[in-house]
Image: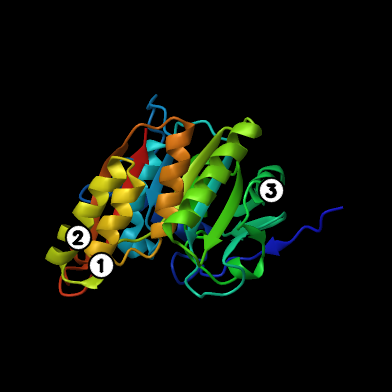
Amino acid sequence: MIEEIRRPPAVAGIFYPKEHFELKQSIEQSFRNQRIGPGKTPPSFLKDRIYGIISPHAGYAYSGAVAANGFYEISSLEFDSAVIVGPNHYGIGNKAATVRSGVWETPLGQVVIDDELSLEISKNSRLIEFDDFAHSRDHCLEVQVPFLQYIKKNKFKIVPIILIIQDIETSREIGQSIANSVSNRNKKALLLASSDFTHYESNSEAYTKDNELIKTILSLDISKFYTVLEKLSVSACGYGAIASIMVAVKILGATKGKLLKYATSGDVTGDTNSVVGYSSIVFI
């Protein structure tokens, strides 16, 4: 019998409100944001086939409205599981870690780990290991869950994957293992890369650098992605997560990415001297 492990929220009250009503209100405000968000609440009633998304992971006050664009777009999408990949900000635990079983909690309730898909992905990967400790403190995957809960009413499971190693070979291997596992299990799965873009540079510099990197993402060209990343020294924290999802969605049938919204913390706060870039992208 598999031991069920409960992960309580690590950043409720820090990155997003810790009370159910306040959190729901914060998410709805992100959707209704006319300037940076979609300007309306789900459902979207869109019929496009969406294979995956890129979503930011800062505090909701900063990146929630940008993130809402992607979640609005997928709100009519049918999926049973969400495979969420992001960077390990604390460098703790295994270099590439998922979770075997259990539940993750947020103020909006519990989400169950898809133990079948998690096991399949780990079997198909030389790198991914089971390690709850690696996930214990990080915010990058946790902040995505309340948005998913809001649009799916908790009727989905998750496979969280957190990365310390983010080189191109690792991204190719993990992306292939995700795509193969989703196909093998015949899953209706949403693939999500959690990442912010340029960190702590001027607003104009962030726009310039991130625009060049986003072009490579939209073309699903992982080699160009890493070339631009290194050439321009783009400080996107979850670059390996982005690349892994690019590889996976391309294998599963995506032909391009579509930029829904790019903005920076400076666009939100008015302080444009040192900003963080946020992007919402869907793969179709």
Mark 2 residue type: Lys
Q: Position of residue 97 (x, y in %)?
A: 61, 61
Assess whether mark 1 and mark 3 are in contact (beta carbons under 8 angstroms).
no
Which residue is disc 2 drawn over? 209
Is residue 12 visible in the rendered image? The answer is yes
Mark 3 residue type: Lys
Q: 111 left or right of 225?
A: right
How far apart marks 3 and 1 lie (CA) works out to 34 Å
Question: Is residue 172 placed above or below 200 in the rendered structure?
Answer: above
Question: Is residue 45 placed above or below 131 in the rendered structure?
Answer: above
**Closer to the N terminus: mark 2 or mark 3?**
3
The C terminus: image quadrant: top left
**Closer to the N terminus: mark 3 or mark 1?**
3
Snapshot colouring: rainbow
Q: Which structural element holds mark 2? A: helix
How far apart marks 2 and 1 lie (CA) works out to 8 Å
Nearer to us: label 2 or label 1: 1
Which residue is disc 1 drawn over? 233
Assess whether mark 1 and mark 2 are in contact (beta carbons under 8 angstroms).
yes
Mark 1 residue type: Ser
Q: Position of residue 135 (x, y in %)?
A: 59, 66
Which residue is disc 3 drawn over? 123
The numbered dot on residue 225 is none
Question: Is residue 4 placed above or below 135 in the rendered structure?
Answer: above
Q: Which structural element holds mark 1? A: loop
Q: Residues within 10 Å of mark 1 (few under 14, many from 20)?
A: few
Return the residue found at the far top: 47
